[in-house]
Image (cartoon, grey):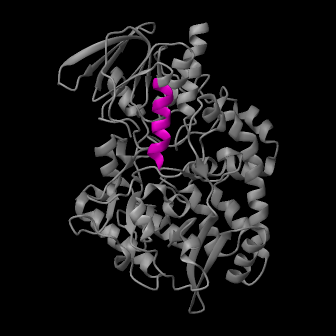
Amino acid sequence: MRTHEARATHGPYDAVIVGGGHNGLVAAAYLARAGRSVLVLERLEHTGGAAVSTRPFPGVDARLSRYSYLVSLLPRKIVQDLGLSVRLRPRTVSSYTPTERDGRPTGLLVGGGEERTRAGFARLTGSDREWRAWRRFYGMTGHVARRVFPTLTEPLPSREELRRRVDDEDAWRMLFEEPIGKAIEDFFADDLVRGVVLTDALIGTFADAHDVSLAQNRCFLYHVIGGGTGAWDVPVGGMGALTDALADAARAAGARIATGHEVLRVATDGRDAEVAHRTPEGAEATVAARYVLVNASPHTLAALTGDAPPPEPAEGAQLKVNMLLTRLPRLRDSAVDPREAFAGTFHIAEGYGQLAAAHAQAAAGELPAAPPSEIYCHSLTDPTILGPDLVARGHHTLTLFGLHTPARLFARDNDAVREELLASTLAQLDAHLAEPLADCLATDAEGRPCIEAKTPLDLERDLRMPGGNIFHRPLSWPYATEGTGRWGVETRHANVLLCGAGAVRGGGVSGVPGHNAAMAVLEGHRG
């Protein structure tokens, strides 16, 4: 993350961008490359927003992706258009899910080629039935991904236009009309396999498999369409490498980036705007702009413009844990190498029944008795985030993402509940290990274990995400509805656009809202 940024100066600018997260930087780079004058105002002392790399453990040369950590939704078009020097590496294994069957430790390994995956299903279930169902199911989602993903950087299609583009009524009904739980139960019989499929519908989304709102379907859709394949890749150098590349591209094109400048108000008459902000010295200043692009939540946008806040609640539902280990722990399932098990997504307490129970308990105001979560090891795919000495000594990172822990559960005492949830989450992991995870944790320069946990309330405090919601608000369908506008970034103010995760087709590390807001500005200029 870059901290040596320019100071804000007088306008007017063609565009002032509020917030230097990855979407704001994408918009800045596109507009500056098109010859527009651009100023980015960022509240923090660095750019990147939630897509940053930091060294969270004192005295330890490990640069971790502190918040967001994998990339799937970033279109190749954006990388090529902006000439980004960013590398993404595929993971060698898709997932491993440990369990116990007939009193013995076993699990499901997905990845390493079709025959190996088939053998993994047969080992767990004793037949090829679930593997064949898996191929049919993901054949359908793959078809949808290839049809839908390219539309994300185009003007919003109507619902019927997108339906015609998908051109598969069974897939459309499964993903867009019926709760995803129905399809999962129709396709799969094994509880563990059902749970592995369902997890993609629950990342940062607090919903049941059969929620009538279809919030889980929208979450699932965005998790399986990335790149037209649904693959989730590791950013080489960590997330900060991506946002540093974006900042470099914006700056090289002529955009000015000013950190330590908190935007206070946006006034507009629909043609010209004035952005009031606080300087690093604490003084208030203003800058004029033709357009204002807000790389923040819809709630923040409303507060800046004096409009009514969005009616829908914004509540995060995840626990993010970063760890550094001296070695990867051995598994009770000795048939699987930890270097493979942790290379992909390591599912914990994520059977279908377990996920339903955890949701019901959290909805009743209780912490899940068996908190579901998933882990992966960045350093197995990309060791560059660790110093040479740590690599030589066999150290590794672990990133854990917990589900079904809505912000409301932490309201009574964030610190105490965080520690309670962390302990019970790690206990679920330990149940599948041949040695306690605590024995593998590295220590920092002060002798403390290298582990940090972030709740939704921590994200709200650190990044001003409303309720700690990583998507800023419930995800949207990738088609036009009443009031969405041509690009899905428009607001009721003609020259104020939303370019953050809360835009239509926002969420995840994609750059899509930034691209689309820039396209809306350029169309407006031509008009």
Image quarter where the N terminus lies is top left
Residue sticking out furthest to the bottom: 103
Whether residue 504 sits left or right of residue 472 in the image: it is right
Is residue 57 one of those drawn in magenta? Answer: no
Whether residue 183 sits left or right of residue 71 in the image: it is right
Q: Residue at x 35, y 58 (%)?
A: 61
Image quarter where the C terminus lies is top right
How far across and down, in percent of the image, does residue 340 sit? 59, 72
- For residue 99, which quarter of the picture? bottom right
Which one is in front, 320 or 202? 320
How far across and down, in percent of the image, does residue 37 sit? 46, 13
Q: Is residue 113 above or below residue 237?
A: below
Q: Give the range drawn in magenta.
A: 238-251
Which one is in front, 304 or 309? 304
Is residue 241 one of those drawn in magenta? Answer: yes
Q: Is residue 515 above or below residue 108?
A: above
Q: Residue at x 66, y 25 (%)?
A: 155
Q: Which residue is drawn at 37% across and 26% down?
A: 302
Q: Is residue 4 above or below residue 238?
A: above
